Image: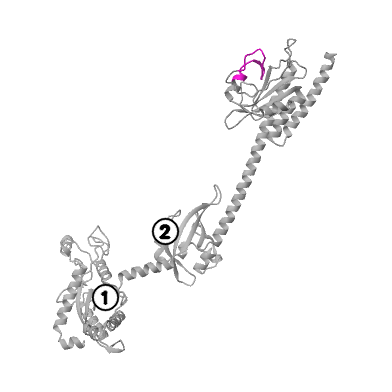
């Protein structure tokens, strides 16, 4: 009877096994899959207890991930961890039944350092040869899908079984069934892990996309509503630098609508004098202070700060430019610079600024111009008496005090003493007011200040554009006038004196001052102080040569 019924029993077991495998592959999560694997050993393979030990990806140790058949044993060992070393020793012991490992109760396999989670069952000693003993152990290793055999593949986990219902060691069919079951369980667990990883990846991707959308929205709001100007421009290609997008603050700053801004690049808007500054500014991380043109034709000082942003991982790159209005700061800086270089009372360039401007026109060298004449075989002026251009031979930077290689410095020369051949030069007119001290003494310093202010105004009005009128100090003024001949300089001195001697309203009364002029000539080889001293000496000669009454009357 037993032999006749065995094919039916095996067919029923196959049906149960088929159903369990279907359940394994349709479980919704990794935890459900592991529990289905443990339950299937009980329902389809005829064992009373089963345990699924899963290899942890983090450290390779095996954790009891699912248990079925005995609630007490389940509570005892679920979640416990056995070291990989102990499991490797255990799987190397006992009898090899294909991929299965059977360790009979006669083997002394329980070692002192063995930390594999285990349970003990009670029962009598075996009464016949293949009867199951309570201390017998049967393990079914699970390997990565696609690789069969314990000598190949990566260990995924181990199914431990105990106490077959028929009380016997599994035969050939039972062993084959358990081995096949472990193989299919490995596939199901791998698929469950893959699904879990995909779900986590999808969740992570969704979170990243949400974060990206939030970041893009934050950037959009920060860009649109930033209190200072912002612009995005193309980077690279034929349209490099073309403005793609601007915020309201930049449009208000430049008085241009956003639609019009898209027709420009910053090079179209920058002040012509600041093009070099813009070009020298590096694209990424570059900073520059320059002027941008408004719609009404005026310019505003701004600070540009650039950074590069990418549209995607390998997408196009754009230039993000932050534009800060620094007009007020620049105005204050210019005011401070003006105060440092100009007289606070009259607003004219002061003594330091006068010397700076004069020095910028002169160059000096050991031996003076005579050494240049000797070196190049000609005087330092042309046939018209103008400064000779040494660009092809030698020179120095404008304002330099010595020759430092070759450049395009045009030497400043003076008309020759005692000749009036039409030569032109840089005239330095030293002016000293006559009778000014008596105004201070009689009417007070307020009146004296009013006189100085009016004299400064008249001098500035009488000279040409490009000439310099400076207050040297006290009642002394200096005029720098380039391109004048000797007669031109004399005429200018007369014209300036006639302007000064006109009555001046000071403290409610009309006062008069005179003026004495000394005319000096600047030429390369002299210092600024030497030029001023020469003009000052000539002024005193002129003052002493005039009758005292005439000097007082002006």
Measure the C-alpha gap from mark 2 to mark 1.
Answer: 39 Å
Vertical placement of residue 220 versus 460, above or below: above
Q: Give 159 or 325, whichever is nearer the viewer.
A: 159
Q: How is the image coloured?
A: one colour
> Magenta residues?
89-110
Q: Is residue 105 magenta?
A: yes
Q: Position of residue 177 (x, y in %)?
A: 73, 21
Is residue 434 visible in the rendered structure shown here?
no
The quarter of the picture where residue 279 lies is: bottom left
Tag 2 residue: 279
Label 1 neighbourhood size at 10 Å, few (<14), some (14-19), many (20+)?
A: many
Label 2 neighbourhood size at 10 Å, few (<14), some (14-19), many (20+)?
A: few
Q: Is residue 549 magenta?
A: no
State which quarter of the image contains the N terminus: top right
Q: Give 508 or 199, whichever is nearer the viewer.
A: 508
Q: Give 43 or 278, whichever is nearer the viewer.
A: 43
Give left or right: position of 422 versus 134: left
Question: Residue 6: which disc?
Answer: none
Q: Position of residue 19 (x, y in %)?
A: 78, 29
Q: Position of residue 41 (x, y in %)?
A: 73, 25
Taking the spot 25% from the left edge, 65% from the top edge, the residue there is 389
Q: Secondary structure at mark 2?
A: helix
Number of numbered discs visible in the structure rendering: 2
Front: mark 2 or 1: 1
Vertical placement of residue 116 versus 132, above or below: below
Q: Secondary structure at mark 1?
A: strand
State which quarter of the image contains the C terminus: bottom left
Vertical placement of residue 197 versus 476, above or below: above
Tag 1 residue: 471
């Amino acid at each position: 009877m037993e032999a006749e019924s065995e094919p039916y029993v095996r067919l029923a077991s196959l049906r149960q096994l088929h159903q369990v495998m279907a359940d394994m592959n349709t479980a919704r999560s990794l935890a459900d899959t592991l529990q289905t694997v443990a339950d299937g050993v009980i329902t389809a393979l005829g064992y009373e207890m089963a345990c699924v030990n899963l290899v942890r990806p983090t450290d390779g140790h095996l954790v009891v991930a699912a248990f079925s058949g005995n609630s007490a044993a389940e509570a005892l060992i679920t979640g416990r961890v056995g070291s990989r070393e102990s499991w490797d020793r255990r799987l190397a012991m006992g009898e090899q039944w294909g991929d299965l490992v059977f360790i009979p109760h006669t083997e002394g396999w329980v070692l002192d350092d063995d930390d594999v989670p285990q349970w003990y069952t009670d029962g009598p000693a075996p009464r016949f040869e293949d009867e199951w003993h309570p201390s017998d152990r049967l393990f079914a290793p699970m390997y990565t899908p696609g690789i069969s055999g314990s000598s190949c593949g990566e260990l995924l986990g181990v199914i431990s079984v105990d106490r077959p219902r028929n009380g016997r060691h599994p035969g050939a069919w039972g062993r084959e069934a358990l081995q096949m079951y472990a193989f299919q369980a490995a596939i199901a667990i791998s698929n469950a892990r893959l699904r879990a990883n995909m779900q986590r990846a999808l969740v992570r991707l969704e979170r990243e996309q949400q974060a990206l959308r939030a970041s893009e929205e934050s950037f959009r709001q920060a860009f649109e509503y930033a209190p200072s100007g912002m612009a995005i421009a193309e980077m690279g290609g034929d349209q490099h630098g073309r403005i793609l997008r601007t915020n309201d603050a930049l449009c208000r700053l430049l008085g241009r609508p956003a639609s019009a801004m898209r027709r420009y690049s910053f090079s179209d808007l920058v002040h012509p004098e600041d093009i070099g500054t813009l070009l020298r500014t590096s694209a990424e991380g570059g900073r520059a202070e320059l002027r941008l043109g408004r719609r009404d034709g005026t310019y505003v000082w701004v600070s540009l700060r650039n950074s590069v942003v990418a549209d995607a991982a390998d997408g196009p790159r754009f230039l993000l430019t932050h534009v800060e209005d620094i007009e007020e700061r620049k105005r204050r800086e210019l005011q401070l610079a003006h105060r440092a270089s100009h007289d606070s009372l009259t607003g004219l360039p002061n003594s330091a600024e006068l010397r700076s401007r004069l020095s910028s026109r002169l160059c000096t060298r050991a031996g003076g111009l005579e050494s240049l004449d000797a070196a190049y075989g000609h005087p330092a002026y042309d046939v018209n008496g103008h400064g000779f251009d040494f660009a092809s031979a030698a020179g120095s930077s404008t304002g330099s005090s010595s020759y430092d290689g070759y450049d395009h410095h045009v030497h400043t020369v003076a008309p020759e003493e005692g000749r009036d051949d039409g030569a032109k030069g840089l005239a330095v007119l030293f002016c000293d007011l006559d009778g000014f001290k008596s105004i201070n003494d009689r009417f007070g310093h307020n009146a004296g200040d009013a006189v100085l202010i009016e004299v400064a105004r008249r001098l500035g009005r009488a000279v040409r554009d490009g000439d310099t009128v400076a207050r040297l100090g006290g009642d002394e003024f200096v005029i720098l006038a380039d391109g004048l001949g000797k007669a031109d300089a004399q005429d200018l001195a007369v014209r300036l004196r006639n302007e000064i001697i006109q009555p001046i309203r000071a403290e409610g009364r009309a006062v008069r001052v005179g003026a004495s002029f000394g005319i000096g000539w600047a030429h390369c080889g002299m210092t600024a102080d030497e030029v001023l001293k020469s003009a000052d000496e000539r002024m005193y000669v002129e003052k002493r040569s005039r009758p005292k009454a005439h000097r007082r009357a002006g």
